[in-house]
Image (cartoon, rainbow, N blue to C red):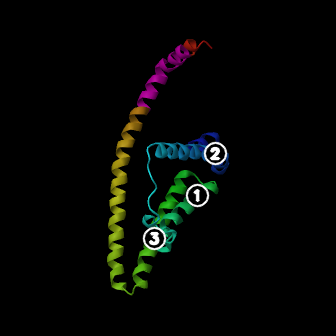
Amino acid sequence: AFIMAEWLNIPYSHIAFAATVPAILYFGAVFAAVDAVARRDGLMPIDKSQMPKWRDLLDLLNGVPTFGAIAVLIGFLFADYTPTVAGAAGTIALIGMQLVVRVLRHAAAGRTREAGEELVKLGRQIASGLDDAARGLLSIAVLLGCAGVIVTVLGSSGVAVKFSSLLVSFAGV
């Protein structure tokens, strides 16, 4: 959807609204298929006592950073910012909310001295995440560079045009 919005120069919100019905149909079909296979194989649902409570899933302190960052990301996308800006805003919001929640959690428990240790731990987690992202980005950058070289060679040599003409002739168009 991000690429479609960029190429077609249409706001992301228009594409998201247009994709609502197909997305509902797709996920409904996936749900039905999984349910049919589970019934066929005799898989039973877990006991209600083992299911997590809604209260635990929507815990304010644990859920705010995750859902808040997603809300910021979606808000920026629907405000017609680029996906890059929206992603950066979501990441900054996630880090800020994690910082606030971790400090508040220790302050509410009366353990203000441990808040400093928690902030150091958060800093280490951020540094580790940035390191992992850089390592993943390197492999993607190499692949994209190779793909760019191949596309340039095919385009400048005329092989791409000849190949597409060959495919069209096979199709009988």
Question: Are the residues at dot 3 and dot 2 in contact (C-beta closer than 8 Å)?
Answer: no
Dominant secondary structure of the residues highlighted in magenta in the image: helix
Amino acid tagged 2: Ala
Question: Are the residues at dot 1 and dot 3 in contact (C-beta closer than 8 Å)?
Answer: no
- Residue 68: x and y in percent read 53, 66
Q: Is residue 45 visible?
A: yes
| Mark 1: secondary structure | helix
> What residue appears at the point 35 percent right and 75 percent down from the top-left corner?
118
Q: Give the Cα distance between marks 1 and 3.
A: 20 Å
Q: Give the Cα distance between marks 3 and 2.
A: 30 Å
Earlier-in-chain disc, 3 versus 2? 2
Find out whether residue 153 is within the magenta segment.
Answer: yes
> Is 93 displayed left or right of 172 in the figure?
left
Which residue is label 1 attached to? 74
> What residue appears at the point 44 percent right and 47 percent down from the top-left corner?
42
Amino acid tagged 3: Asn
Which residue is label 3 attached to? 62
> What residue appears at the point 41 percent right and 30 percent down from the top-left corner?
149
The magenta region covers 148-167
Badge 2 crowding class, 10 Å Cα cut-off, few under 14, some 14 to 19, many 20 or more, is few
| Mark 3: secondary structure | helix
The dot on residue 135 is: none
Q: Give the Cα distance between marks 2 and 1.
A: 15 Å
- Residue 155: x and y in percent read 49, 24
Q: Which quarter of the image is occupied by the C terminus?
A: top right
Earlier-in-chain disc, 2 versus 1? 2
Residue 44 or residue 97, whichever sits in front: 44
| Mark 2: secondary structure | loop
Which residue is label 2 attached to? 19
- Residue 150: x and y in percent read 42, 28
- Residue 142: x and y in percent read 36, 39
Amino acid tagged 1: Ile
